[in-house]
Image (cartoon, rainbow, N blue to C red):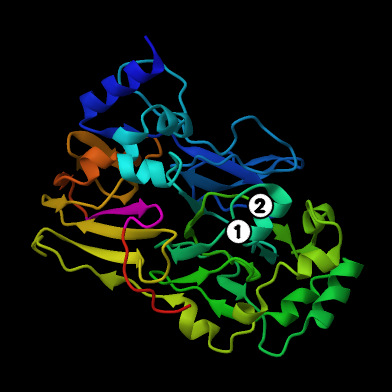
Amino acid sequence: MKKEEVLNEELKATNGILRLAPTFVPRTDTTALGRLGVKEFYISPERGYVSERWIASSVEAINPVKVQDEGLSFISFTSRSLNLSLREALQILPGRLLGDKYAEEHENNFGVLTKVLDSGTPIPWHIHANQEDAMKYWNMNGKEEAYYFLDSKIMGPLPYSHLAVHPDVTENELLPILKRWNDDKVLDLSPAYRLNIGEGFHIFPGVPHAPGTALTLEIQEESDVYNTLQAINYGMKIPKEELLFNLPDEEAVVKLIDWGKARDPLFYRKYKMHPTKIVNSNSEDNGVANWVFNPNRTRKFCGKKVSVHPGKTFEGIEKGACAILVWKGEGKIEEVKVQGGNSNMDELFLSDELATQPHKIVNTGKEEMVLYKIFGPEVYKTSIIYN
C-alpha cells in the first residue's frame, strides 16, 4: 500500500488526528535532570545528555555527531507498520493536514518547532541569527523563540536566565572575550532574570541568551542554527567551533547581534510574558484556555494552555492545524486516548480538517487535564504590542 493511502486511512480512522512518537535529542553543552521521562539520559561524552524533547518536529538536529533523522518526529500508526516522518507526511498530504491556503503560503511546512528543555545546567550564552543572516551562512531559517516555564517540583540548580545585555555594553567589550575564548566573562555583560512557573520570555533573533534550569516549553521557528558565545559553562570547555560555526571570524559573530533589542533598557518589561485568558463559548464549569504564547507578540507562532476539569468535556475549535502536548491528566481528543506523562500517548498533530471544526477534549480522569496547543505562523493574527 502506498504511503498516501496509508496516511489517508489513518486520518479516516482517527477523524483527522496523527499520534506522534516521542523525539528525544541529546546535547553536549548541558546535562539533564531526568524530567523528560527518559531513565538513561546520559549517552556518551561525544553525544552528551538527553536534555530536549522535540514536539511535532520537521527539523533535523545540528549536533557534533550527526545522526540521520535525529530531531524528526515520526507518526505512530494505529493499524499499519510504516516509517513515516511528520515532515514527509506534510509533503504527501499538505491540504488535508495544513489546509490548502496555509500549505501554499508556507511551502507545505508546519512552520514551528516546539521543545521541552530539561537542562541540568544552564545552556551556554548563545545567539540565533535573523532570517537574512541564517540564509546567508546556513541556508536555513532564522530563529525567533519564546519560553514558558512548566510546573515542575524540580527547578534545577539555577532557575535564572541571562537574557540580552546591559544597556551600556559595547561591541568592544564583547569582542575580546570571544577572541580569547577561555572563560565565562560574557555573563558579566548580561542581566539574569528569575524563572517563574507559569510565566515566560520572548526572544528575538540576534538577542544573546542563556536559558536556566527551569523545565521549559520552548516554541520557535523551524531552525536549529546557533552560535555559542560562552567558552566555559559550569567548568565544561566548549570548542571554539561552536562560536565560529559557519562564520569567518569573531567579528562576524558580533554582527549577528541585534544591539537595539539586546541593549533595550526596557527589555524585561517588553519581553516578559504572562498567560492571557481566552474568552470563548465554553463554560468555565468545564475548563479554561489561556494564551501562553500570545499572538499579540509575534506572527511567527502562538500557543494555548487548555485545562479541562475532571469528568468534563471542553470543546475546541481553532483557525488552523496544531500540535498538542498533553502535560498531565488523561482523557480523549475525539476518540484518541491521551495520557500526560506517558510519552507514547501525550503527543498529537491535529489536522486542519479537524482543528478548524468543533472537536471534543474529554477528561476521563480524576485530576485536572492540562494540554498545550501549538500553532504555526499567522494562524492567529492580531495587533502586535511591540516592535
Look at the image and say whether residue 91 sits in the magenta stretch.
no
Badge 2 marks a residue whose secondary structure is helix
> In the rendered view, does 221 fall on the left or right side of 134?
left
**Furthest-top residue in this view:** 1
> In the rendered view, does 368 fall on the left or right side of 256?
left
Residue depicted at 43% across the width and 42% down the height: 56
**Mark 1: which amino acid?**
Gln
Task: Please tell me how crowded label 2 is: few (under 14), some (14-19), or many (20+) other residues with Cα within 10 Å.
Answer: few
Residue annotated with mark 2: 135
Residue depicted at 75% across the width and 42% down the height: 64
Badge 1 marks a residue whose secondary structure is helix
Residue 213 seen from this side: yes
**Mark 2: which amino acid?**
Met
- Quarter of the image for residue 22 reads top left
Mark 2 vs mark 1, CA separation in Å: 6 Å
Image quarter hosting the N terminus? top left
Task: Please tell me how crowded label 1 is: few (under 14), some (14-19), or many (20+) other residues with Cα within 10 Å.
Answer: some
Q: Which residues are magenta?
A: 368-379
Number of numbered callouts drawn = 2
Pointer 2 with pointer 1, Cβ within 8 A: yes
Residue depicted at 59% across the width and 79% down the height: 261
Residue 345 seen from this side: no
Q: Position of residue 281 (x, y in %)?
A: 9, 62
